[in-house]
Amino acid sequence: MGSRRSRTGVTVAGIAALERSVRGTVARDPKSLARVVSDASPLSAPALAVVAPVDAEDVLAIVAWARKARVGLVPRGGGTSLAGGAVPVGPTVVVDLAAWNTVVEVNASEGWARVGPGLVNLDFQRALQPLGMFFPPNPGSWTRSTLGGNLGTNASGPRSFRYGPTRTWIRALEIVLGNGRRVRLGTRALKRSAGPDLLSFVVGSEGTLGIVTEITARLAPLPQVREAFVVPVPPTARLGAVASRLSQAAGTGLSAVEYVDGTCASAMAERRRSLHLTGEALLLLEIEADDARQAARRRARVLEMLSSEGVSSPATEVAPEALWTLRGEAGTLLDATIGPRVREDVAVPLGRLDELVEALRRIASEEGMGYHLYGHLGEGSLHPNFAVDPTGERGNRVRARVVRTALALGGTVSAEHGIGLLKVPFLVEELGPGAVDWLVAVKRWCDPDGILNPGKVYPER
């Protein structure tokens, strides 16, 4: 949604006023600005300055300054958005929250932790491990992405097959809205029926409603046994049938059902030879169990089901954390293999997954370009990659064809990467004008001056 006020240039005196308003640092040097002009998407744009607030009072002061100066604010954590969610648009100041990386409090008996929004996902997992707990969402960027960013896009990851996306694991949060109000949403209680869930408006909003200053995350107990293994997939296998069979079976203990095609598998094998991966298309699976005997029974059952779907190659066991870290690098590994590309993120019902896979192949063939696929197979959530300039006319056409194919199959234009800048034109197509008007009304109340992450998520109305 565009601002309802015209934006003006910001003078040196204006930035100086920001410096006087906060106890944190305000940087304008070329090195600091170069660090925030882009994220993991192909987009980039300059910023006026980078401000690193030290506490919520600083954030309140930053919002008050931005409203008066009519300057946009872009909240930033790890800069891992694949949809341009952290790219500056127009005259903007980046609010760098990376230093807000503290685990403030953990209550293992009640299963929650209070953390700063700049805490990196993997660092959080490591802090929880000695306590026998973990935070289930583990997006592919978990070595770099922050909890604030995970919340902003409702990120998922391999374990979401069993545990669901980030939204499921947020108990409460504190946030400074664009209207200058500081509010707390949610509760540590296990149940609540106190009106509409305002917390859900923030999860997935990509920093367009407010700047999150603290997160209360729900935790899960670490399973006694976790086993990860890879299984080669023959070209004749129907991926949708495999996903449906595994998702409908009870008692398997499966927590992750991932897929990588042959090109991705080869790149992964080259990067981490110690995992002994092959260059064939692979299923990457994880099982949780109470003990080794139960894990062995569950693994045998899963392999039997796969065999019935034409996937009968022997399984190779690998270390879970190493596998998911490597799987998270699949996109980076393709950078060296096929270079600039359209990296998409769509999902469809499992019963339509084979139709989606066939449609993606057809798009690549008709457009005359290389195509590679990986994703969260067990949820019908795929990441097709097309070897084409992602910012050019052909790239935009391919992106539109992919997301509209997913919509036609009853799916979504974004399974876990958010809308950002890249997918704003498609939001109305998925939600419909009535629902988008509702979202825009929420945006206008929370951010009446349109200062928060301008240009993202909301189409011009």
Image: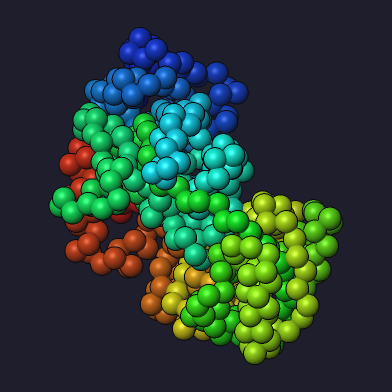
79 relative to 339 in the view: left or right: left
434 relative to 308 in the view: left or right: left
Above or below — where is 294 with respect to 149? Answer: below
| Residue 107 x, y percent position in the rendering | 42, 38
Residue 113 in sight from this viewpoint: no
Q: How many marks?
A: 0
| Residue 178 x, y percent position in the rendering | 26, 34
441 relative to 229 in the view: left or right: left
Q: Residue at x 72, y 73 (%)?
A: 231
- The quadrant holding residue 117 is top left
365 relative to 455 in the view: left or right: right
In the image as oriented, which residue stretches furthest toward the left?
195
Q: Residue at x 80, y 65 (%)?
A: 277
Above or below — where is 265 with respect to 179? Answer: below
Q: Which one is nearer the viewer's eye here, 91 or 76?
A: 76
Q: Residue at x 54, y 83 (%)?
A: 245
| Residue 121 x, y percent position in the rendering | 54, 42
- Name the colouring of the figure: rainbow
| Residue 382 x, y percent position in the rendering | 54, 68
